[in-house]
Image: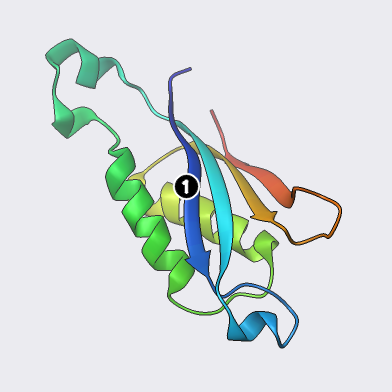
Amino acid sequence: MDKVLIRGLSIDTVIGIYEWEKQIHQTLVIDLDMAWDNRAAAAGDDYEHALCYETVSNRLTALITEDPIELIETVAEMVARCVMDEFNVPWVKVTVMKPGAVKHAQSVGVEIERGHI
């Protein structure tokens, strides 16, 4: 299986359940593994057949910063749905990390897989 990967996509947004969190921006860090058949793009060295990681990254940044969100679980589901629906990706693994959310942990997060390979 071929994959297109995005690692460490940092997005500053309003995220959290506490009132003080709703008044500030915090950073989320997102990793994506997206199933994508790269053979057509590689065979013709043709961008038109590639899954553009810049376009995906820009779309996800816009999506996550559009409105305040309380849970990183919600972010993960939103990301998976967007990638599958808007970019026709058949399978995606999404990891959403929230650095500094827990005092003695570097980061906390969730990971989901959606779709079929």
What type is the residue that disc 1 sits on? Answer: Leu
Report the residue at 37% width, 49% height from top: 57
Taking 84 as reference, is 23 left or right? Answer: right
* 71 vs 7, nearest the viewer: 7
Residue 67 spot, x, y in % from top left: 49, 79
67 vs 114: above or below? below
Residue 9 spot, x, y in % from top left: 47, 47
Crowd band around label 1 with a 10 angstrom C-alpha radius: few (<14), some (14–19), many (20+): some
Report the residue at 65% width, 51% height from top: 97
Report the residue at 53% width, 51% height from top: 80
Q: Mark 1 = which residue? A: 9
Q: How is the image coloured?
A: rainbow
112 vs 49: above or below? below
Determine the image quadrant of residue 44.
Answer: top left
Determine the image quadrant of residue 47.
Answer: top left
Residue occupying the far front of the picture: 104
Taking 102 as reference, is 43 left or right? Answer: left
Residue 101 spot, x, y in % from top left: 75, 62
Q: Secondary structure at mark 1?
A: strand
